[in-house]
Amino acid sequence: MASSLNLKTDLLIFDVDGVLIDTSMSYPLVVAEAIRWVWKYVLDHHVDAPGFTLGHFYATKVFPPFNDDYDIAWSFLCATLAQETESLRRSAPSLKEWKKLLETSQGMDIEEWVKKNVGDRISRLVVRRICEELYYGAEKIESIMGESPLFITSGKGYWREEKPQISMHWSDLSLPVGIYTGRSKGEMKLALQLLGWEDLPEEQIITPESGITKPSPQGIAHLCTLFEANNPIFFGDTESDRQALLQFGKGQFIAIGALLPYWSMQFNSLSEAFSFLKNKMIL
């Protein structure tokens, strides 16, 4: 790392899921339900087992290509369909098998990895749309996406189970604030409402619609240019977050949560990280 907490921090960059917002009851459950929904209603196969577990989800988040949670559903379905049986119990990779398969994803983007290792066996766009409808719920699909649900016509949406991890307004923080997230603009809108940060300027938020996605360092570089910053702190919770900061080559990555226990700057919560930084007189 080219710089550290020993230098003057001049920008705070946040990931959203698992950092600013507790998503433990939203995205993991969306992915698991989407897999079973596709298996039963799209493929007309037999759901005779859960298939996908929280263990599968959190094991996947350690690998940089899987920054987008909806791609976890798509890739797991492709791997399951590669077994060519209609039983989810017999087809779904065990946690051990899934981890072994994930090891082959290093240095590849998700689409390349799926095609090479298990085959593109179901529409990525269909799986994504089903995930979106489960996450938003029928009402929000119409209000945010401007169209009626295509697959799931009832349900309030898993986004309602999310909880903010910070009680401060962004303007009360002592340093400029940016966000670098894998959330779409629509999902980000709900996150900002939950945080009470609706007034955070749009140019301070990097979403996939910008053409920049983690683990690319370009999102960090863009925010540093915007604020003329040289030594940011990036608060993230996954390997793709960590790699983005490492590739940027300046600043400090702070891990939030349990997914990166090997990283020296790791805290159980954002509030715990803030307490540490205040003691170091950085915040």
Image (spheres, rainbow, N blue to C red):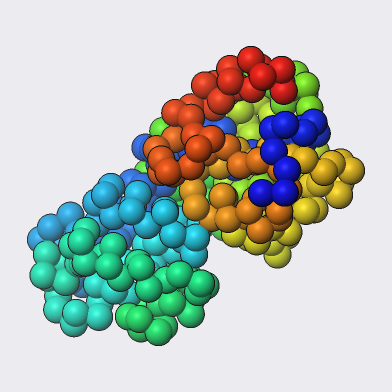
Query: Toward the viewer: 204 or 279?
Result: 279
Quadrant of the rendered structure where residue 161 is? top left
x, y percentage for residue 157? 42, 42
Query: Toward the viewer: 196 or 61?
Result: 61
x, y percentage for residue 148? 51, 57
Residue 151 seen anywhere in this rendered image of the structure: no
x, y percentage for residue 248? 71, 55
x, y percentage for residue 223? 79, 47
Residue 255 seen anywhere in this rendered image of the structure: yes
Quadrant of the rendered structure where residue 282 is? top right
Residue that sits furthest to the right in the current view: 228
**Residue at position x 21%, y 72% in the image:** 44
Q: Which quadrant: the C terminus? A: top right
| 17 with respect to 36 (left or right) | right
Quadrant of the rendered structure where residue 210 is? bottom right
| 247 with respect to 110 (left or right) | right
Residue 167 to residue 104: above or below: above
**Residue at position x 77%, y 21% in the image:** 174
**Residue at position x 48%, y 42% in the image:** 263
| 275 with respect to 200 (left or right) | left
Number of labelled discs? 0
Residue 123 to residue 229: above or below: below
Residue 214 to residue 80: above or below: above
**Residue at position x 86%, y 49% in the image:** 225
